[in-house]
Amino acid sequence: MNNQGKTGIPESEINQRVEALLAKMSLDEKIGQLNQVSGADFSPGPKAVDVIRKVGAGSVLWLNDPRRFNELQKIAVEESPSGIPLLFALDVIHGYRTIFPIPLAMAASWDPAVAEQSQAVAAREARAAGLHWTFGPMLDIARDARWGRIVEGAGEDPFLGSAMAAAQVRGFQGDDFADPERVLACAKHFAGYGYSDGGRDYDPVYLSEAQLRNVVFPPFQAAIKAGVATFMSAYMDLNNVPATGNRWLMRDVLRNEWGFDGFIVSDAFAVINLVIQGYARDGREAALRALDAGLNMDMASGAYLDNLAGLVNDGSLTMAQIDEMVRPILALKVRMGLFEHPYVDETLLEKVVARPDHRQAARLAAQRSMVLLRNEGGLLPLSKDIQNVAVIGPLADSMEATEGSWMVFNHKPAAVTVLQGIQAKLPGVSVAYAPGPEIHRDIPHPFGEFDSAEKKPPQTAEEAESAYQTALETARGADLVIMVMGETADMAGEFASRGSLDLPGRQEELLKDIHAMGKTIVLVLLNGRPLSIRWAAENVPAILEAWEPGTEGGNAVADILFGDVNPGGKLPVCFPRNGNHAPLYYARNITHLPESSPRYRSRYWDDLPTPLYPFGFGLSYTTFSIDNLKLSAAQVKVGESLTVTADVTNTGKVAGDEVVQLYIHQKWGRDSRPMRELKGFERVTLQPGEAKTVSFQLGPDELGYWSTHAGAWIQEAAAFDLWVGNDSTATLHAEFAVVG
Ligand code: NOJ
């Protein structure tokens, strides 16, 4: 019962109130609570206001307007038969008005505290706008960078992903559902969505139970441990059963095994989509199968609204089944004090978003998330005395690309761009700027239709060529060229998978042409997924992965480029040499012909299969040594823990951060195990010459795994390798044994 205690109201009182409500609700009113209705004009089906007035609703989504929230809430409370208030829900993924780095970037901070703080700010702003519930965090482990939604998660690793999951849940929810500065969180998408075939969005997923339990599930379990209020079912087929109709996922695992007592909402239209997916004959069967599988709330599809009453009346479903689905929805509304405080103060938002600490938090998060990929000859940090600098690239002055994908509805971009950040660092210097040709998706993003902002027509071929030439000219006149390249915000996210990971458009060509002029180049990347930047990695002396860094992104980039901040982020995903190498991840199993074998050449005959930059990698303006690796015991019994310590020392001349990472490998067992798995990390800040001892615990949770052979979670007597270092190729090594 993970949610107990997370409110001031005693559990018994909550239950009593829920039962009292249920006792006086008609079937239609109960069904109303099982619906999340769309507040947007674009949705098909009945209007939210009509449904609310008639039978009430569990929740409203796709609306972002405090005044309208209050209007609809008044109808729910005063005019709907049950008078039950509505939960207003929206995707607040990485900030409401103050935008934080995209979640993949937050994971690159390897700093759960900063992720928690960021989502706490997002929650405060969202709540002040009248929202009660966000559809985040997204916890899908993603190992295929072609999949667009890799931008929304914490990357490829379940251990890092779990730490980020718990931190985000704590940030959104705090530790009391009744906290008026927090929102309910939603662990999504349950489960397996990150493994869609070929990285193609929504494509089916085939995953073994071992993969699910060892890799996909841990962040969801961490979210439950952190008290997450709700879950969202995924769209896709998991082993031939759509997640939204998947009884094993929703009942057997989530509720019965893990004891989740909140409620599950479908993804948008996913209930009726069961028909399109060929899993249900019609809407009636879709509703029946989803509810029977344990899905509480239908997001926007109307299938519950249209069919549940008929299903109860003809005996296909019982009232007890309906009550079971309604209960956790009502319980959350009671727990969070929604009945006592259904309305939002419409003047609150502007006061809350004006808080300077929100901007400061966004700048800190952006600084901590950036990863220095290359710095030949210590080109960075740059001197603030430089006079003749050009900033070039299609994203250099783009607020949209700086804020990144997944903005809340009706959000007006307002980020400090990289160009602006650099200009602010160099007062009195005139910074030359040329965007070069625009970059676009080949197939436009479908959400573009909902974007009310006026769009200028795309460049003509002549305009693009002229922009290219202007960029070359601008670079020619400069001593140092800062090139800001990557992907636009709509190139990652939902509906944003790609077959290639190359820099889109003519960006690499421009990079090469300016390089050929003999210019010193610093490349700043703005992107929401790993890109294949091999040419740049071999030719451009300095590369900063800035991701999509949010409102303060441009300032944070400039802080790092000019040395006010020393970068300390690390990659939460491997960067492949080539997009065709996806999926690529470090925690692979060992083959019969391992890389250490003398007969080993390569897994491809035309390329190295290793990443361009490995998981966990990132440079600093200082240097570190990690040594003095010690284990509390060479041998522990099954069920016992051992302590691993190592010393990390700043051996350079400036203060900086290092992320000390611990990896293990179980050498044999009933199942094969990955060649390395992250099992501990800590980000430390050290002054020049300063040393610190970091300490990690390895116990049954870290040393056990879900075994295909045993069909259960087991811990075995076996020998283990262990490495400590600053990326997933760490070489500082020790061994230990677990004995029976
Ligand atoms: C579809 C997306 O898959 C999901 O992540 C999102 O929360 C819902 N739409 C609601 O906008």
Image (cartoon, grey):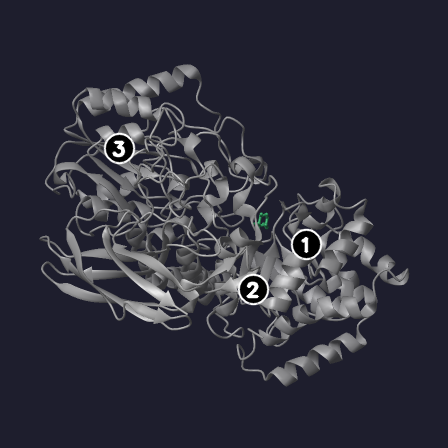
Q: Could you say which disc has been placed on residue 132 in the image?
A: 2
Is residue 367 toward the left or the right of residue 20 in the image?
left
How far apart in space, not on screen, are marks 1 and 3 (Cα)? 44 Å
Label 2 or label 3, whichever lies nearer to me, is 3
**Above or below, comparing residue 71 to residue 539 in the picture:** below
- Specify which label sits upstream in the sequence, 2 or 1: 2
Q: Nearer the viewer, residue 370 or 200?
A: 200
- Specify which label sits upstream in the sequence, 2 or 3: 2
Instruction: Identify which residue is drawn at 49% across, 54% down.
Output: 139
Q: Position of residue 421 (x, y in %)?
A: 26, 44
Find out if the beta carbon at label 3 lies less than 8 Å from the nearest ligand 1 atom. Answer: no
- Residue position marked by numbered label 3 in the rendering: 537
**Discs 2, 3 touching: Cβ within 8 Å:** no
- Specify which label sits upstream in the sequence, 1 or 3: 1
Is residue 547 toward the left or the right of residue 325 in the image?
left
Which image quadrant is residue 630 in?
A: bottom left
Q: Residues within 10 Å of mark 3 (few under 14, many from 20)?
A: some
Q: Position of residue 49 (x, y in %)?
A: 72, 56
Q: Is residue 127 visible?
A: no
Q: Residues within 10 Å of mark 2 (few under 14, many from 20)?
A: many
Q: Tell me the SS state at disc 2.
A: loop
Q: Amino acid at mark 3?
A: Ala
Q: Quadrant of the C terminus?
A: bottom left
Instruction: Identify which residue is drawn at 66% across, 70% down.
Output: 328
**Discs 2, 1 touching: Cβ within 8 Å:** no
Q: Tell me the SS state at disc 1.
A: loop
Q: Amino acid at mark 1?
A: Asn
Label 2 or label 1, whichever lies nearer to me, is 1
Is residue 671 toward the left or the right of residue 692 in the image?
right
